[in-house]
Amino acid sequence: MDRSGLRTEAERRLWDAFPRGEMVDLGPGDPTAEGFDPDTWGEDRCVRGEVITRLLLGACERQPGYVARIDLAGARITGEINLSGGQTEHELHLHRCWVDEPTTFTHASSKTVIFDKTRLPGLVGTGWQVSGSVAFADSRCEGETRLVSAHITGILLFSGATLTNPDGTALTADGLTVNGNLVCRDGFTAEGEVRLPGAHITGQLSFNGATLTNPDGTALTADRLTVNGSMFCCEGFTATGKVRLISAHITGQLAFNGATLTNPGGTALTAELLTVGGGMLCGDGFTATGEVGLIGAHIAGILAFKGATLTNPGQRALDLRDVECPHLFLPTRTDGQCDLRRARLGTLRLPIPPEQPAMRLAGLTYTDLDPDPDPPVRQRIAWLRRDPDGFHPQPYEQLATYYRSIGHD
């Protein structure tokens, strides 16, 4: 393709601007708005995906002294942008654009790609290699966004984005590698499952203020996720459906402060064999409806449910079997059982009676009880007697060991 094959004035403007990396703005409008009709944009706003593909693959040379790139605003992209297996040295920036067909980067190699307030019917980026960053800022993807085994050397940004695929997966990023931060915050919304199993994020992972919705299934699957920094699910983070962090490894903190996890009658959070190098914070109004399970988790810092409310009536609300951590704050309010069997703790901070739930205690060990080290013995005995499994000698032996350690024989 050369300039003679262009069909519209919009395509010619883009072709001429590309060698110098200049922006082409075809007019106002917000295609991410509800009820937006792309047919209101005429031919003067249309650019074929084929033209964009050819420019990215070198059909037009850059002008010496300039950085060639596509920088397009207010366009309707007809047909497919398809760089499958291709390599481009040019960035792609689409602002306030409507894209008719899914964009494809399967096994492509590219520079930075930015979708800003742009509407897409989905994106396929299996094996995509990006030397730079990828952004979906304030954009809408109505269909699957697929980044399986993609490798992004910069940041991956979904701030303010909406991913919608309610009957399937909104974001599929199994085996994704990001050599920076993964940012899904500031109103990020996903309808359909978000998948990050086996992903590796070398920076921070933020879901602060995000809303994940998959009420009949899993809202977030992040088994074997590795985050070299911290993972934040705070500032009103909401998940409807199960959240999975099985065998995940977080080097820094894992924070759910103020989050709301909802999966009534099921599991709200399952994080068996989770490893956290810092603290795990689930307080300050953290609410879970459904079981929270951390079986076999290793938390190097504090595990805090202070100010949390856990609800799973008649069933386990909190499962901490085989957990290891130096300091555990149990939830302020729990409607359901708390399972501490075989947990290995330093300091155990119990809720003040009568807020203590029924606890399963066989095999639990601890070195300190906080905040009151010396309540009436009958109060401690009453705590042990509420064990739903009935009498076990070990919890009484552990309590006696603790009293001896503080000089109460």
Image (cartoon, helix red, strand yellow):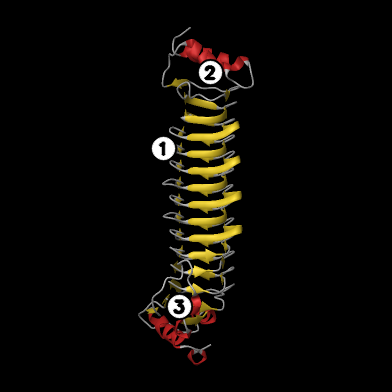
Residue 55 x %, y %: 49, 81
Q: Indicate the secondary structure of the residue bearing disc 2.
A: helix
Q: Earlier in the sequence, mark 2 or mark 1?
A: 1
Give whichever of discs 2 and 3 has the lower sequence position. 3
The residue singled out by tag 1 in the image is 284
**Residue at 48% of width from left, 34% of height from top?**
309
Residue that lies at the very extreme toward the bottom in this rendered image: 4
Mark count: 3
Q: Which residue is mark 3?
A: 75
The residues bearing labels 3 and 1 have C-alpha atoms spaced at a distance of 45 Å
Label 2 neighbourhood size at 10 Å, few (<14), some (14-19), many (20+)? Answer: some
Q: Amino acid at mark 2?
A: Trp
Examine the rendering and report whether any part of residue 149 can be seen: no
Determine crowd level at label 3: few under 14, some 14-19, many 20+ residues with C-alpha closer than 10 A.
many
Q: Which mark is residue 383?
A: 2
Residue furthest to the top in view is 409
Comes first in the chain, label 3 or label 1? 3
Q: Quadrant of residue 24?
A: bottom left
Mark 3, secondary structure of its residue:
loop
Where is residue 293 shown, x and y percent of the image? 58, 36
Quadrant in which residue 340 is drawn? top right
User: Is there CB contact under 8 Å for labels 2 and 1?
Assistant: no
Q: Secondary structure at mark 1?
A: loop
In the image, what residue occupies the spot 59% across and 43% down?
A: 246
Mark 1 burial class by Cα count in 10 Å: few <14, some 14-19, many 20+: some
Can residue 74 be seen by looking at this rendering? yes
Q: Position of residue 286 (x, y in %)?
A: 46, 39
Camera-side residue of 94 and 224: 94
**Which is nearer the eye, 198 or 173?**
173
Q: Is residue 330 above or below residue 59?
A: above
- CA gap between label 2 and label 1 equals 25 Å
CA distance for labels 2 and 3: 67 Å
